[in-house]
Image (cartoon, rainbow, N blue to C red):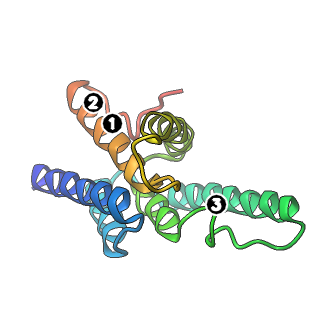
Amino acid sequence: MEYVLLSFLHVIFIIIIYQDIKFRHIHIILPVLIFAINYYLNFNLTSSLEIFKSSGFLIINFICITIYFSIKKSELVNPFKGQIGLGDFIFLVGVIPMFSFRNYVLFFITGMFFTLILHVLFRKKSIQKTIPLAGYLSIYIIVLLSFNILIPTNIFYSFLF
């Protein structure tokens, strides 16, 4: 059952990659499915406190983004109208049960660097100027899931730092 769900997760991430790169939006059900599947797969590892801390970390980041762009434009700015897509936020919430809090923070930081590198590499080929954050992070997660199969420890929940 676990392998079937992991395969289904791979398919969902591939669909997100396609939708986000081609259309710059993702269907709302995909992050919901990711959350549900990962919560089921990691039920013994996931605690409400871990999910709460990761959610708080994400909310603090988005508050900081709002403050930054509001100061920059000298007016209150909704970051979901131009700076970042709502689907990207929902995607980041959807992957929370995949990680312990520490590893979620590590995923968030390294995932942003990974996204930046991919954006720099592919920006000349892209017609659109926006960054498909959920799509690039899906590529990153597929790489992490593949790497996790090769090593004996769970990189999503073990202490990596």
Q: CA distance from mark 2 to mark 3?
A: 28 Å
Q: Is residue 141 left or right of residue 91?
A: left
Q: Residue at x 82, y 73 (%)?
A: 76
Name the amino acid, label 1. Answer: Leu
Residue 56 marker:
3
Q: Position of residue 55 (x, y in %)?
A: 57, 61
Q: Residue at x 52, y 54 (%)?
A: 129
Q: CA distance from mark 3 to mark 1?
A: 23 Å
Kindly identify which residue carries mark 2.
Answer: 147
Whether residue 24 is situated above or below residue 113 in the rendered picture: below
Name the amino acid, label 2. Answer: Phe
Q: CA distance from mark 2 to mark 1?
A: 5 Å
Q: Position of residue 62 (x, y in %)?
A: 67, 61
The image quarter containing residue 118 is top left
Figure quadrant of the C terminus = top right
Whether residue 155 is situated above or below residue 151 in the rendered picture: below
Mark in front: 2 vs 3:
2
Figure quadrant of the N terminus = bottom left
